[in-house]
Image: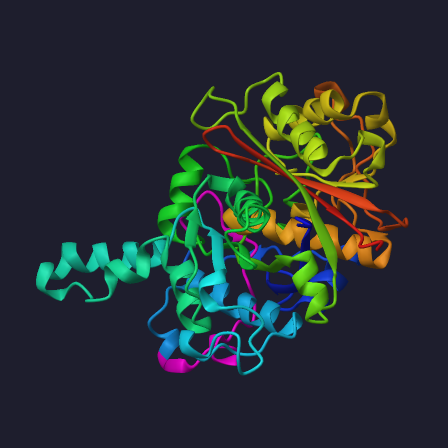
Amino acid sequence: MNKAVAVTGLGVISPVGNDEDSFWTSLTQGKSGAGPITLFDASSFETRIAAEVKDFKPETWIDSKEARKMARFSQFAVSAALQAWRDASLPQVADSSQAGNNGTPYPTERMAVVLGNGIGGIEVFQDSYSKLLTDGPSRMPPLTIPLMIANEAAANVARIFQLHGPAFTQVTACASGTDAIGQAIDLIRSGRADLVVAGGTEAAISQFAIAGFNKLKALSTHYNDNPQAASRPFDKDRDGFVIGEGAGVLILENYDKAVARGAKIRAIASGYGATCDAFHLTAPEPSGVMGAKALSLALEDAGLKPEDIGYYNAHGTSTGLNDPTETAMIKIAFGDYAKNLKISSTKSMTGHCIAAAGALEAIACIKALETGVLPPTINLDNPDLEAGCDLNYLPWKAVSARINAALTASFGFGGHNGALVFERDRS
């Protein structure tokens, strides 16, 4: 049996656009989604900027009654999943008794969901806990628990589409979206599923999260008056990441079955690799050896050599530790070819969307394969050569390059390393 995995649909909610086209236009034009925080009063915080999703109206995609029963991260996930589902030209599933009929391509128990999420409905937790402290336990909102727990995004997607296969939530911090797509690939290859709705979602721009990340000295604090300049991966003047939010969702299918139903094959998800540093709660292992191993495993899984990769979408967080360590990983995994590899960090525009980051960056790779345009790293004025950041990070301007394969990587707190390879469908 052909175990190739096809990407047949894409959906995006992001700080730079709430659909695939606007997202990609913003990235290729170098537009930043960072700005002053509007979701709460941040005037007393060290960090007063973020890359928020703008003009998001959940009722555009979701029934208003349904939307009120979802935290923001779930609303993002369902909205992006609905986009991806439609992009894949899939009919709405009615119920399991009709699976395989009514135009439905697969039995519902053969369709699965795997979504990455790092923090869940943190705004729900924050608001409900405040009410508990001020008004007492009897005033806690009754839906506090089901809205805040991290699995609810996957559960809502499964419920709305009536998908009765596995519905998993991947929680590996900033690698969650990447690992969710990797787990989806494995589900299809193993024969456990024919179709998987996969990706990542996050909505963590809240007082609790900003204060917590500030205590870790992880967020940018020097660019509150110039937020669009704050996310500057690989630049010597970087001072922390800009927190973002959103969701990226892919429809993955067994290749032969996707072709049989006449689906448009947007890319092949051909490789996945994952490792753990087993080193520190927040810092990457300095040598980058295990992160590099994840990259090499993804290449091996795809059956490709380093020089087959035309574009590398970097984790590129704009932090003091990540950028030089990731550069070291690239040099280990790609060897002499590293100096010729075209690299960029789209987080320079989207900010760091935590669990959604890897999924949005996977979509950026697929768009690069389709369009022959590689997005830039904006705000890269002075590469941090002293820290070893001396590769080709495509500063400021998009580059035209017809490529056959792209690799994206994510590295999360706790030492979680994940990498994905996508290829153009050349069949």
Left or right of residue 174: residue 347: right
Residue 416, position as x, y percentages in the image: 51, 32
Q: Quadrant of residue 32?
A: bottom right
Q: Quadrant of residue 312?
A: top right
Residue 320, position as x, y percentages in the image: 60, 28
Report the number of discs: 0
Nearest the camera: 342 or 101? Answer: 101
Q: Is residue 228 visible?
A: no
The residue sitting at 60% across, 74% down in the picture is 90
Nearest the camera: 202 or 237? Answer: 202
Relative to 5, is 70 above or below?
A: below
Left or right of residue 172: residue 11: right
Relative to 139, is 243 above or below?
A: above
Relative to 181, is 285 above or below?
A: above
Relative to 5, is 81 above or below?
A: below
Residue 240, position as x, y percentages in the image: 57, 36
Q: Residue furthest front?
A: 1
The residue sitting at 32% across, 54% down in the picture is 149
51 is within the stretch colored magenta:
yes
109 is within the stretch colored magenta:
no
Q: Quadrant of residue 287?
A: top right
Q: Residue furthest top?
A: 287
What main secondary structure does the magenta stretch of the protein show? Answer: loop
Which span is picked out in magenta? 43-65
Left or right of residue 135: residue 267: right
Left or right of residue 73: residue 137: left
Nearest the camera: 46 or 326? Answer: 326
The residue sitting at 61% across, 65% down in the picture is 11
